[in-house]
Image (tube, rainbow, N blue to C red):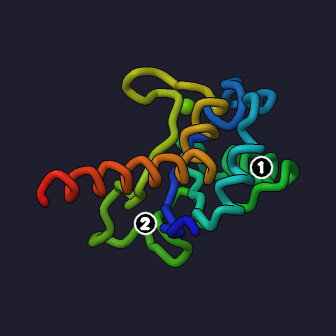
Amino acid sequence: MIPQESKIIAVDFDGTIAEDRYPGIGKPMPFAFETLKMLQGDGHRLILWTYRTGKKLNEAVEFCREHGIEFYAVNKGFPEEDMQHPDTGRKIHADLFIDDRNFGGFPGWGVIYQKLSPENRKIELEEKQKRRRGFFGRRR
Ligand SMILES: [Mg+2]
């Protein structure tokens, strides 16, 4: 059984979930919603982390809802976080950020899906255990 560590994953909207047509909304990026659903199914919490506010933000949230994605939080780290409070930092806490402006460029959802899919993580874990066994084997 794979240990289920639930991650908080912040996801950008324009250019990441949908093609960048800001202030409009582009077509979904290939495999974006498939990957987001897989991640939610795996127990990860998704945050929509976008420049959009107000009506433009609501349109993005509705677009995702129509494609079957409901976010854990929108433009905040957790549902109750008060971003206006003076003690609240502007940067949210997340374990992972998925954004088309990442250093190194956007790898595409196909690559992200493969990297984060349970099957791939299982293989990684098995390799790690193999290496560990090898390490202790050498010490004896
Ligand atoms: Mg973007």
- Asked which secondary structure carries label 2, the reply is loop
* Residue type at the position of mark 1: Cys
Measuring from the top left, give residue 19's x and y in whole percent.
71, 25
Question: Where is ligand 1, by quadrant?
Answer: top right
- Asked which secondary structure carries label 1, the reply is helix
Q: Is mark 2 within 8 Å of ligand 1?
A: no
Please report the residue visible at 71 percent of the width from the left and 38 percent of the height from the top: 32
Please report the residue visible at 87 percent of the width from the left and 51 percent of the height from the top: 66
> Closest to the observer: 95 or 61?
95
Measuring from the top left, give residue 134's x and y in whole percent.
27, 50
Please report the residue visible at 73 percent of the width from the left and 46 percent of the height from the top: 60
Above or below 58: residue 18: above
Instruction: Write down the residue under mark 1.
Output: 64
> Closest to the observer: 67 or 55?
67
Q: Is mark 1 within 8 Å of ligand 1?
A: no
> Closest to the observer: 74 or 1?
1
| Quadrant, the C terminus | bottom left
Measuring from the top left, give residue 95's x and y in whole percent.
41, 56
Task: Kindly report which numbered mark, 2 or 1, lies closer to the viewer in this rendering.
Answer: 1
Residue furthest right in the image: 66
Measuring from the top left, give residue 24's x and y in whole percent.
75, 30
Please report the residue visible at 37 percent of the width from the left and 26 percent of the height from the top: 103
